[in-house]
């Protein structure tokens, strides 16, 4: 064989190697995937929502009367004792100023009351004169009756007239006193702040001391400066911060999954520990609340009891984060939630079998943010692909990362 033949064989070999390299380079490569094992173990489904702490028994201190409340020396956080600590002092409010119209109206009423006093005084003088005449007439009739000049009946009529006139005098005196008091009442209406300053109230009757209705700490002081308040105005909120509970406003669709007695984990309260709590009551009535996105949501209040004894400085109306257990099992078959995807109307996963992805239909029951409970389709220790991309299909070649 000559040199030409050798060169032909060498060229053919090189061409074959090039073609083989191109075929190898252009063939589909296995897709790199992350995998996880299907395992058996405990699983819990949680309903998570923001909540607020609050004192179980809050006592509201209100103003018993209208008046001027003095500046209190107590502040939020101060300790008070039931029926001993004075939380507020209320003085009578200053009389109001009168405009020109009101003043003229009051002065007219004063003049009318003064005229009524004069009229009653005149009626009193008339009654006294008539009573004096009746007494004189009675004395004369008694003398005549003793001598037999007038009959007994005339004497009786004279005695009745004297009694009637004496009663008229008493009635007229009372009427005069009444009119004088009415005159004083009308004059009192003219008293303004400038008059009150010259006639202060006696110390023993000037103020009303409002005492704490319960022992505990002041939660809120609603009025700091001295001011005029109406009867019933809320002044303080008092409560025992050692008796604390948590209020969580759940969506009604989540509240129906919760049962009284369910365990709760409290986080996000500022401390490093997870506080233990338990559902005490689910209120039967819901309410509408507008979310941050402007959506009307139907919410239900759920009341939690804190079971952890030492809660540090956690106080009233503090923000917390509650994770309420709605379902729990100690042994279920679990698959990572990131391995699930929809295939038609069913749920499915890709199971790793001999270096290829095998699409498997599964039936799922409970799920949380991490795993789902497998009812049918998988077995323990099966390896499933996490976050399957569009490069993965049934029977696709894969390579584990």
Image (tube, rainbow, N blue to C red):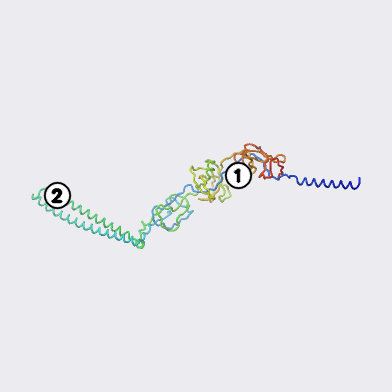
Image location (x, y in percent) of residue 313: 53, 51
Disc with the residue nearer the chain's start (2 vs 1)? 2
> Pointer 2: what residue?
157
Which residue is more in the foreground, 111 or 241?
111
Q: Is 284 on the left-hand or right-hand side of 142?
A: right
Q: In which quarter of the image is the C terminus?
A: top right
- At 20% from the left and 53% from the top, the residue drawn is 168
Which residue is more in the foreground, 134 or 106?
106
Where, by quadrant of the figure, is residue 34 drawn?
A: top right
Image location (x, y in percent) of residue 86: 42, 54
Q: Is 297 on the left-hand or right-hand side of 26?
A: left
Q: Quadrant of the N terminus?
A: top right
Residue extending furthest toward the top: 376
Closer to viewer: mark 2 or mark 1: 1
Q: Is 157 on the left-hand or right-hand side of 3?
A: left
Image location (x, y in percent) of residue 9: 86, 46
**Mark 2 vs mark 1, CA separation in Å:** 109 Å
Q: Is 204 on the left-hand or right-hand side of 315?
A: left
Mark 2 and mark 1 residues within 8 Å of each other at the beta carbon = no
Q: Residue 311 carries which label?
A: none
Label 2 secondary element = helix
- At 68% from the left and 42% from the top, the residue drawn is 393
Q: Residues within 10 Å of mark 2 (few under 14, many from 20)?
A: few
Residue extending furthest toward the right: 2
- At 60% from the left and 44% from the top, the residue drawn is 369
Which residue is more in the foreground, 233 or 244?
233
Where, by quadrant of the figure, is residue 359 drawn?
A: top right
> Pointer 1: what residue?
369
Label 1 secondary element = loop
Image location (x, y in percent) of residue 357: 69, 41
């Amino acid at each position: 064989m000559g040199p030409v033949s050798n060169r032909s064989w060498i060229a053919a070999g090189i061409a074959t190697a090039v073609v083989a390299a191109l075929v190898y380079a252009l063939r589909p490569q296995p897709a790199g995937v992350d995998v996880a094992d299907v395992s058996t173990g405990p699983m819990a489904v949680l309903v998570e929502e923001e909540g607020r702490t609050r004192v179980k028994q809050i006592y509201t201190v209100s103003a018993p009367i209208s008046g001027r409340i003095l500046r209190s020396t107590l502040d939020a956080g101060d300790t008070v004792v039931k029926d001993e600590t004075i939380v507020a002092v209320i003085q009578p409010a200053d009389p109001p100023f009168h405009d020109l119209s009101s003043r003229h109206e009051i002065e007219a009423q004063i003049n009318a009351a003064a005229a009524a006093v004069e009229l009653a005084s005149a009626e009193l003088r008339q009654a006294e004169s008539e009573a004096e005449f009746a007494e004189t007439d009675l004395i004369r009739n008694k003398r005549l009756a003793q001598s037999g000049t007038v009959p007994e009946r005339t004497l009786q009529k004279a005695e009745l007239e004297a009694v009637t006139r004496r009663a008229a005098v008493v009635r007229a005196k009372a009427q005069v006193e009444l009119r004088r008091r009415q005159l004083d009442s009308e004059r009192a209406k003219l008293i303004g702040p400038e008059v009150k300053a010259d006639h202060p109230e006696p110390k023993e009757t000037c103020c009303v001391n409002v005492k704490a209705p319960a022992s505990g700490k002041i939660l809120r002081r609603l009025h700091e400066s001295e001011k005029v308040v109406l009867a019933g105005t809320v002044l303080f909120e008092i409560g025992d911060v050692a008796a604390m509970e948590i209020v969580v406003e759940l969506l009604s669709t989540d509240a129906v999954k919760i049962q009284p007695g369910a365990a709760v984990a409290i986080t996000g309260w500022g401390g490093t520990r997870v506080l233990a709590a338990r559902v005490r009551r689910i209120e039967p009535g819901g309410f509408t609340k507008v979310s941050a996105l402007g959506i009307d949501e139907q919410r239900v209040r759920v009341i939690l009891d804190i079971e952890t004894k030492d809660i540090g400085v956690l106080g009233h109306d503090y923000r917390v984060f509650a994770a309420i257990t709605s379902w729990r099992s100690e042994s279920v078959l679990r698959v990572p939630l990131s391995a699930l995807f929809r295939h038609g109307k069913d749920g499915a996963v890709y199971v790793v079998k001999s270096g290829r992805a095998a699409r498997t239909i599964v039936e799922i029951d409970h799920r949380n943010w991490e795993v789902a409970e497998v009812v049918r389709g998988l077995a323990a220790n099966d390896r499933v692909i996490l976050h399957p991309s569009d490069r993965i299909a049934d029977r696709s070649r894969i390579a584990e990362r």
